Amino acid sequence: MADVSEVVQRSMNINQKLGPRLLAAAEQNAILRIGWTNAGDPVPKNGELGLCPALPEGARLRALGALGSWVAAFGKGGSFTLQGDAQGFLGAANQGTNITCEGMAGDFAGYRMAGGSLTVLEGCGHDAGAEMSGGCLLVRGTTGARVGGGMSDGLLVVHGDVAADPGAGMTGGRIVINGRCPTPPPGVVLRPLAKKELNEINKLLEDETMHVPSDAVCLVPAEGLSMERSGYAVSTDDLSGVGLTSDEQQLRPYETVDTVALVGLADHVQSLALPLPLLPAVDSGATMTPAKSADDALTSILERHPAMVSMEPRAVDILVVSRDNILSTGDELGSAGGFAIDLAQLPPMNAEHLDGLLVALRSMAVENAPAVLMDSISRVQSLHARAVHHNAEVAMARIEDGSGISEAAALPMTARSKKEHITTDTIQTGFLLGFAASGHDLAVLVASGVDIVSCAAPMADAEDIAYWLQGTQDDLANELRRIGINSIDMLERKHLRALNHETAAVSGLRLAGYERSLPHWFAR
């Protein structure tokens, strides 16, 4: 059996070769084939994943073999036919491609699709059509649990039996079932198809053998009250209970200190340089674009400072990929300097699923772009292990994950996990904070072993963000001068002190005055 890295590399190579040929083939109305030699002899693929992302209008592809996850995802047009089976997330985030799978498909087929069509001829796994908002998903054969779960629009037709909880959480769209259907979950209504509705659906299905009979049933959302969701528990602490100290002489107030950090340390990665170890989190990269009339100094600060964005990335920004913007990822990723996968905001993925998504994203991104994995602080050990396994550049833990774990308590959790799981010095750790970081906060986190910090900008105006970034950099530099070091790379845990008993109790830091960690940190 092929090594995972070999499968990933084979998949990347196929996508790289296809890229320049797609538009040319579309202009010539030619079909590109994967799984056949130039002479037409079949050489079925086996496990390749993330193939053919963001297919453009006019592209026509045919593949042979058993493929992995995230195949033909982010499609914009054209057609893709697979003579064989596929794993999870087949045709995910599809917006216009017509996809046919002549075998079986795994879990989350058609996830978040908004347009186009997906036809699977031998059944699907769980969560087929989950959160779809448009397009048509047609399945012949049995489907797993939660078919059409969370869908808001579109048409899902199943010629076969469905498992438990069909349509769970759906708010729109229709699920037509020509087979056995269990009792739908609360909020979903099962009803017969009206004659006019049946004719309308069958007109959409070009293949007469896939037409829906009159005794099929239809699932639609029930009309009811819209309930407002309660919020998660949040951390009630910050890093004000941690101090910075040193025996070194303080530096002169005008002495230059180094606050620069890099995202991506491996030789093959196109690193992003940060003037300070901070990635402001803003909705749009346009927020970091100054007005033409802005002062040159402010313009320089904004243009050279990368940010974490959800849309309109600049060439220095990291695009966060989550359920909310997955439909625009194919259009915008090529403009970004790197990408971050928000695991907490996407369906649960096993190692093969995540490899497929990484291959698809790396194939659409600029060459050698740094990849960030994001997850909640309560899953930090899994996050670090996955970052190593999937060769990500940064593993970033979100503090505000609903657990209520404080920043001080997250420090030893991260340090222990990093020591246990991260065995290479090219993988960086990060924190996504729930408050706007100060220079002091950055110094404390870097001293505790956190490489990159991200937080929401405290204001939305580009000029104000520039002042905040410059002020934070000045504050960080002053903290370094005060404790007598000239580079953030020299910050260590020995520079940290807990300023109160509670902080010392949860962080394991030496308590100021006591100058030792509290005794329970030494107990077995």
Image (spheres, rainbow, N blue to C red):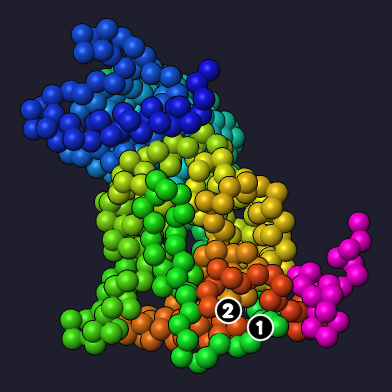
Residue at (43, 32) in percent of width and height: 8
Amino acid type of the residue tagged 2 in the rendering: Ile
- Does the magenta stretch mainly form a helix, a strand or a loop? loop
Number of callouts in the render? 2
Q: Earlier in the sequence, mark 1 or mark 2?
A: 1
Residue at (46, 66) in percent of width and height: 261
Q: Which residue is mark 2?
A: 485
Whether pointer 1 and pointer 2 mark residues with C-beta atoms closer than 8 Å, the reply is yes
The local secondary structure at tag 2 comes to loop
Amino acid type of the residue tagged 1 in the rendering: Glu
Density class for disc 2 (Cα within 10 Å; few <14, some 14-19, many ≥20) is many
444 left or right of 452? right
Q: Which residue is mark 1?
A: 248
Residue 319: x percent and y percent?
38, 58
- Rounded to the nearest whole Å, what is the CA distance between mark 1 and mark 2? 8 Å
Residue at (44, 77) in percent of width and height: 457
Say if residue 162 shows up in the picture.
Answer: yes
29 left or right of 471? left
Front residue of 151/485: it is: 485
Residue at (38, 81) in percent of width and height: 465
Give, as a single range, the part of the protein colored magenta. 505-524
Q: Quadrant of the C terminus?
A: bottom right
Q: In the rendered view, would you say 29 is above or below 412? A: above
Q: In the rendered view, would you say 95 is above or below 123? A: below
Front residue of 63/217: it is: 63
Front residue of 237/181: it is: 237
Front residue of 21/68: it is: 21
The local secondary structure at tag 1 comes to loop
